[in-house]
Image (spheres, grey):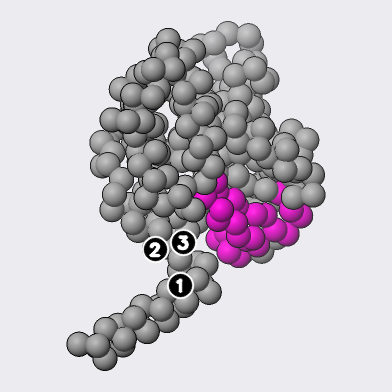
């Protein structure tokens, strides 16, 4: 048994070393574990809401006219050129559209006006061909981006899901992507990244009802106790969650202690 145990230990060590030296495989394993342990999401509005939340934790970073970077809060970061994103080359309309939509300082895009009114009457309106062309181009980009995210993260999007949304305060036809859009890495200081992370985390907790908040805190604290080196700023997340709980639900210090002791 001693020899068998030694062989088992040696194999385990070699496997762990192999995984640690291959970040992509390590990330895929973590992704599989997350999928196995994640509560099933029902179809419809709940699935759409879940995808919106996942996208909010994702960043597309414009690096140059020939490449972009995708980052996730768990530490994933990878650079992609046009071919890796499903485009033939940098001259394709879809790639140019995507790059222009990610460029600072205003990462938005515009479909323009949907209808023209030659005589000023709604009954005689005419569909604008430029709007249709812009929408079709954006729809092509939407499908290619979804394919990349499905490949890289194992996500499954609901039917007819859009990675973009209207800009409420923008002009007619203006849209923006639901994921975060940032400029080249050099423009982003650690303090700015932390501030944005804290604000985004606060927004995520603010969307939860009290039972959902309690469940999220229990899971976060449990994960932190089991894997203290692999939860990504868990103490800061807990502090933000409790602050939101105080503001929204009137939680006392005693209430917060009880939550951690349950």
Q: Is residue 220 visible?
A: yes
Task: Judge left or right: residue 62 versus residue 161.
Answer: right
Vertical order, 116 against 229 (above or below): above
Vertical order, 97 against 33 (above or below): above
Q: Residues under labels 1 and 3: Cα distance?
A: 9 Å
Q: Do tag 1 and tag 2 residues touch (Cβ < 8 Å)?
A: yes
**Residue 27, label in figure:** 3
Residue drawn at the location 62% of the way across and 15% of the way down: 117
The quarter holding residue 177 reads: top right
Name the residue tied to disc 2.
Answer: 29
Is label 1 in a helix, a strand or a loop? helix
The quarter holding residue 81 reads: bottom right
Q: Nearer the viewer, residue 256 or 91?
A: 256
Q: Is residue 66 magenta?
A: yes
Q: Residues under labels 1 and 2: Cα distance?
A: 9 Å
**Residue 165, label in figure:** none
Quadrant holding the C terminus: top left
Residue drawn at the location 67% of the way across and 32% of the way down: 195
Is label 3 in a helix, a strand or a loop? helix
């Amino acid at each position: 048994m001693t020899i068998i145990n030694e062989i088992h230990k040696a194999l385990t060590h070699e496997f762990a070393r192999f995984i640690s030296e291959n970040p992509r495989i390590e990330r895929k394993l973590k992704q599989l574990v997350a999928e196995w342990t994640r509560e099933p999401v029902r179809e419809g509005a709940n699935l759409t809401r879940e995808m919106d939340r996942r996208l909010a934790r994702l960043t597309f970073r414009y690096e140059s006219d020939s490449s972009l970077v995708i980052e996730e809060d768990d530490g994933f970061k990878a650079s992609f050129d046009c071919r890796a994103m499903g485009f033939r080359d940098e001259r394709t309309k879809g790639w140019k559209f995507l790059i222009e939509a990610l460029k600072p300082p205003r990462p938005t895009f515009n479909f323009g006006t949907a209808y023209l009114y030659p005589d000023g009457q709604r009954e005689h309106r005419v569909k604008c061909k430029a709007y249709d062309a812009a929408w079709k181009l954006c729809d092509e980009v939407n499908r290619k981006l979804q394919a990349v995210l499905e490949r890289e993260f194992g996500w499954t999007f609901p039917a007819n899901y859009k990675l973009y949304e209207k800009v409420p305060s923008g002009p007619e036809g203006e849209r923006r992507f639901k994921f975060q859009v940032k400029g080249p890495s050099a423009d982003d200081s650690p303090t700015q990244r932390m501030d944005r992370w804290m604000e985004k985390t606060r927004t995520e907790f603010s969307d939860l009802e009290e039972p959902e908040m309690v469940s999220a805190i229990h899971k976060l604290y449990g994960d932190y106790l089991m894997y203290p080196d692999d939860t990504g700023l868990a103490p800061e997340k807990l502090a933000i969650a409790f602050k939101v709980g105080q503001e929204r639900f009137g939680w006392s210090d005693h209430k917060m202690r009880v939550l951690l002791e349950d």
